[in-house]
Amino acid sequence: MTTTLSQAESPTAATAAAPADDQWSVEAHVRRLCTREGAVAVVHWHCTTDGQLTGQALAGEFNSEQQVSLIRLAGDCFSQQKPMCKIVPGASHQQAMAVPVDSGELGVLTALFSPSAPPESTQRTRTQQLELVATHVHLQNASQPLAADDHTAQPTIWRLFRDWCWSLRKNSKAYAMVASVILLVGICPWPHWIKCQVTCEPATRRFVSTPFESKLLDVKVHPGDQVTAGQLLARLDGSDLRAQIASLQAKHDQAVQRRSAALSAVDAAQVAIERLEVEHLSSEIALLKDRQRRLEIRSPVAGMVISGDLERASGATLSVGENLFEIAPLDRMVAEIAIPEGDISFIEASQEVCIRVDARSSNQLKTRLARIHPRSEILDNASVFVGEAELENNDHSLRPGMHGTAWIRAGTRPIGWQLFHKPFDALRAVIGW
């Protein structure tokens, strides 16, 4: 390798003449390297296109023997692209150091240190100060505008690409090892869990409706109340029934008297008519008395009142079959799982399900998928298939309408497939492949 060395114009004077307030300039850092770390010479080496090693002295002077040592150290730093240190042969045993500038693209900085350096100066501090000078050389070079006729100047993008290629070539073994590890992790099988939204609903529910048209007298329960089988829920107004029963009873008594008179007169036709009238009135009276016995509406099962807030409806006329209360036992609940349409092909009945309800986020419920509805539904503007899973709720901690998150285990698949199959499917949908 051919070498040439050019001395900057009066380097010692140049550093001395540098403005004292320009603390971020290259000259200021070179001066700090000389005063604090005991550097007696600083040289910036460049490698030209024809393989020549040229140097520019930034500070200090050195003899030919020291120059040969610096040139060899700079060449080694060029080839290995890392900071280096060596002892210069001679009576003084001076220390020489070299650091690359911009990964070697802007050359190498070498420094020769005096054996009588300040006591606080160490190899670590010298390396740090020399690297700081190299950084500012890089920044100073980057801030210079490109000349219009400079054919060696390269665009920023191309330079970044070149740096990347250089780094890739220099660390090819490390990159290959990282790629191998990523590939091995990507093909490792892992449980495939599908995340879904879930809503808790009662497994069974009973609706209590109006047995006949009547007015609501009063209400004894409210939504959220726990009731037992046979407990009084509400009462209907029976004043109209009592009036109707009294009227029909009077007509019934008159028909009985007319029938008796017809029997005395031996009028067979009239006896038959009155007998039919008595039977008709008796059946109507029995029907009204049956309704009178059902004025008290009672719960058919034990459970919780889910709906039926009728407190403000007292005195209102209720029609036949109108729903008054919804009562559900809470011992067993059903988790309604909204399975995304894109994942339904991986889901089957009897698969393991882990459910975490928002109200009980610290507890995880495990069950199995019991059934899947055959038809999709629209939920929150998304097409989903609803699956059901049964949950035990002996402590009644689960309430109807509670929301949470369910994870369905859909077998095992490679980790790479789990991470990238959805983006890949989305890309296929975009390009129409």
Image: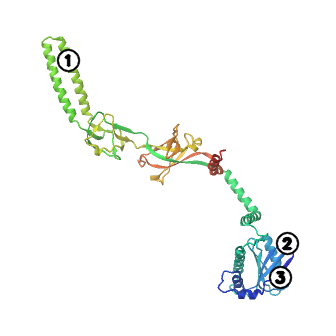
Q: Are marks 2 and 1 in contact (CB under 8 Å)?
A: no
Quarter location, residue 293: top left
Q: Residues within 10 Å of mark 3 (few under 14, many from 20)?
A: some
Image quadrant holding the N terminus, namely bottom right
- What mark, if any, has residue 414 been given in the picture? none
Please name which of the two marks, 3 or 2, marks the residue nearer to the observer. Answer: 2
Type of residue at label 3? Answer: Gln
Q: Secondary structure at mark 2?
A: loop
Q: Is residue 13 left or right of residue 65?
A: left
Task: Give how far across and how far down residue 11 sits, in percent.
Answer: 76, 86
Which residue does the image show at 78% across and 85% down from the upper left? 9
User: Which residue is situated farthest in the front direction here?
Assistant: 148
Please name which of the two marks, 2 or 1, marks the residue nearer to the observer. Answer: 2
First reached walking from the N terminus: tag 3 or tag 2: 2
Task: Give how far across and how far down residue 245 sits, in percent.
Answer: 20, 29
Q: CA distance from mark 3 to mark 2?
A: 18 Å
Q: Is residue 294 above or below residue 167?
A: above
Q: Secondary structure at mark 1?
A: helix
Task: Give how far across and how far down residue 292 sits, in percent.
Answer: 24, 33
Q: CA distance from mark 3 to mark 1?
A: 143 Å
Type of residue at label 1? Answer: Arg
Judging by the rendered image, the residue that carries numbered circle 1 is 275
Judging by the rendered image, the residue that carries numbered circle 2 is 51
Q: Is residue 40 above or below residue 314?
A: below
First reached walking from the N terminus: tag 3 or tag 1: 3
Quarter location, residue 341: top right
Q: Is residue 285 above or below residue 50?
A: above
Q: Residues within 10 Å of mark 1 (few under 14, many from 20)?
A: some
Judging by the rendered image, the residue that carries numbered circle 3 is 67
First reached walking from the N terminus: tag 2 or tag 1: 2
Image quadrant holding the C terminus, namely top right
